Image (cartoon, rainbow, N blue to C red):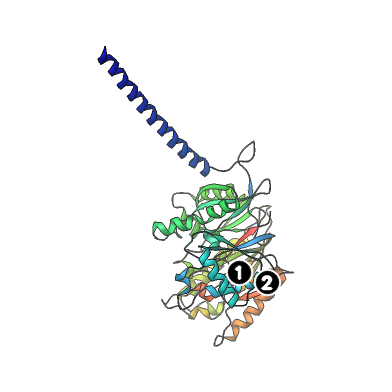
Amino acid sequence: MEFSKYKSKKQQAAIALALLGLLLIILLSARAYTNRVYKKPINYSAGGVTSYVFPGEFEKQQALWLQWPEEEYSTASDPVYPVFVEIIKALEPHERVNLIVRGKEEIAQVEDLLKANGYNGKNLYYYVIDHLSIWARDVGPIFVKDNQNRLNVVDFGFNNYGRGASQYFIDTESQIHRAVARQLNLPLVWTNLVSEGGGVESNGKGTIMLTESVALDRNPGMTKEEIEKEYKRVLGAKKVIWLKQGLAEDDLITRGHINEIARFADPHTILLAQVLPEDRYTNTTSEDSYLRMEENYNILLNSTDQYGKPFRIIRIPMPPTLYGEVDTTGKIPVRSYLNYAVTNGAVLVPTYRKPGRSEKIKAVEDQVTGIFRELFPGRKIISINAESVNLWGGGLHCITQHMPAN
């Protein structure tokens, strides 16, 4: 009898232990399920997946995002922080700037630096988010509007442009857009695509442009059709224009981002880079880029928008005579007038004028400025020297990210 009673207690303990284990499994499963739900496409409509719109950069904005450069970018022989200072100062009368920093100590440092450079504005706001790069266009939030005109952030993957990198770097850069969405209380739109903002251009009406060299490289497990279908789902695109390759000098950096070569100035106008004929045979890089841009030109001549209408195509010359100038590693930096940034009241355009360079650069830049004034009436055209950013592989557009107005 005593043995039977003892056995019963033992059984009860075993049952209690089993129930505790079962409860733990349920809790862990619930947590995992919650994470999976968080990663699923957000659905606000009763009848299916929410539809999205990817606004054009030339449309009304509420802010421009920047990521303040960490020490690596500012201790080099050509520091990039002066470019950030110039952007913040230039945009003060035109648009709010949201600056991503790494902590309160960095905020104090930035404020002191800005004050020393004559900035006492009130249109700059800080967001504390860990980051390692300056490329807000690529790793910052890509904003879309849902069918209720609310902003969402697309949860694109990031793999350091298909190049090797530490997992720490990739993890840190991959969380920036999510942190912005969390701080702004915006929902995420899940996708399995790896994509950077510099790799996609939108006309705001349902047409996007990509380069095959980038989109296929980032998503080797997907077909071209699968990639296109997913872009259409998360960006609301109705038409995808596939250009072949970007600039040859961009091959080792991004493998050919679209924002260096082809931009929508409005829903009907495409600006396309052109290596000037006199620069074509400067070296193998200029020859390769020339041929690629002419191939892309022929593609665009035969392309139409979401309604089947042809585009107005304007050729924008690459900075002339600079294919003979290399960086300290012997490589030709990516220099392009198409790496510009549009804001509400101003367009930030790169300039390459400086003492000792050909007078032809001035003549070409006067031509380019005239084109921008025609295309963006009512906006101030502001020239900014961003060659220090070029040496890191990007430009003005690459270090900015526009946030559409609600």
Which quadrant of the figure has residue 15?
A: top left
Q: Quadrant of the N terminus?
A: top left
Q: Quick check: 190 above or below 345?
A: above
State the residue position of label 2. Answer: 372
The front one of 116 and 25 is 116
Q: Residues within 10 Å of mark 1 (few under 14, many from 20)?
A: many
Judge the density around disc 2: few (<14), some (14-19), many (≥20) Cα neighbours within 10 Å: some
Q: Position of residue 406 (x, y in %)?
A: 69, 53
Q: For numbered disc 1, what is the local secondary structure?
A: loop
Q: Quadrant of residue 96?
A: bottom right
Looking at the picture, which amino acid does disc 1 mark? Tyr
Q: Position of residue 373 (x, y in %)?
A: 71, 72
Residue contact at pointers 2 and 1, CB within 8 angstroms: yes
Q: Is residue 75 left or right of residue 235?
A: left
> What residue is pinned by disc 1?
340
Residue at horizontal 63 percent and vertical 48 percent from the top: 52
Q: Nearer the viewer, residue 23 or 318?
A: 23
Q: What residue is at 62 percent from the left and 79 percent from the top?
A: 364
Q: Is residue 6 left or right of residue 138?
A: left
Residue furthest out toward the left = 3
x, y percent for residue 385? 57, 77
The residue that appears at 54% across and 69% down in the rendered structure is 108
